[in-house]
Amino acid sequence: MTTPPLQPSEVAALAARHQLGRLESAFAPKRLGKMLFALHINTLLSLSVFFLVPGLLFFKWLRRYPNFSRKQAAKGLYLFEHGLIVQPQFGSGMTAFRWESVKLYQDITQLFVNGLPTPTKYVYSVAAPSYGGAEITEFYENPETWGPLLQEAVLRAQGPAVLEAILEGGTIDLGSLSLSRTGISSTRNGHLPWSAVKEISVKGGSVHVMKFDMSSPWCTAAVSDIPNLYVFLAVARNLTPAIEAA
């Protein structure tokens, strides 16, 4: 992770236009490691010598990586005080978002092949009215760092207003779950009063809501279906007596 004193001029101009404030963090595209880079080079040379067309196609495919493309290497993910700017892995241009208007979805998966783990996939989908949408993936270095930073920024910007709206009698819909002053509701399981909620946890890519008189979850929802996960968890913690007292 780097925090440069000056971001590229076009990024700075877009940030100023949307009043994003000071730059807090910046992340560059993740480069291939030395061994994988050497493997790709050897494959490219072998294909180019014996099979020209496959070699050209393979080189075109390699240009998705910053090691083989200046355009890709110049892209960035920029986190500001009041929002973010991201350049997509595929295509050109950049998109700005303000934290207070963002719906943020996260989908973190890891597959196992013959008992061995594959690289973890990170997909954060960002959407906001009048701003459009974007996907941020492990194309950018250190997703285990910038992912929580995204969620925390949305929580700071939206959490207090969401909690206040609920305490004033409103209902906040968060995918298949909704929160109100009286309890948590599920589209499949109905309504559960806060006094009956024992625990809300995140495990294995799912949110589990535990009820006091049940050993299995009262309901389970995929993390990837819940917008602004950290807002949901923080507000639920504030409204649930058992969790608040723990």
Image (cartoon, rainbow, N blue to C red):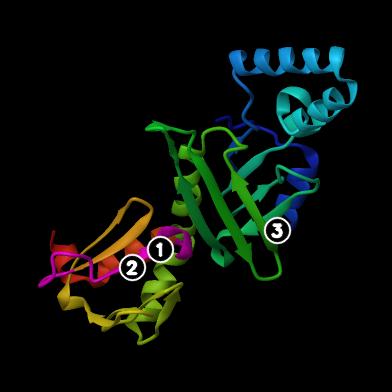
Q: Which residue is mark 2?
A: 235
Q: CA distance from mark 1 to mark 3?
A: 23 Å
The 10 Å Cα crowd at callout 2, few under 14, some 14 to 19, many 20 or more, is some
Look at mark 1 in the image and give the residue it sits on: 231
Q: Is residue 96 visible?
A: yes
Q: Nearer the viewer, mark 3 or mark 2?
A: 2
143 vs 228: above or below: above
Q: Disc number at residue 18?
A: 3
Residue in the picture at 33% in, 62% down:
234
Residue at left 80%, top 44%? Answer: 10
Could you tell me if the residues under marks 3 and 2 are in contact, i.e. CB atoms within 8 Å? no
Please tell me in which quadrant of the rendered image residue 226 appears.
bottom left
Tag 2's secondary structure?
Answer: helix
Q: Is residue 137 above or below residue 214?
A: above
Q: Position of residue 7 (x, y in %)?
A: 71, 36
Q: Quadrant of residue 166?
A: bottom left
Q: Does the segment drawn in magenta span residue 92? A: no
Are the residues tagged 1 and 2 within 8 Å (C-beta)? yes
* Part of the protein shown in magenta: 211-228
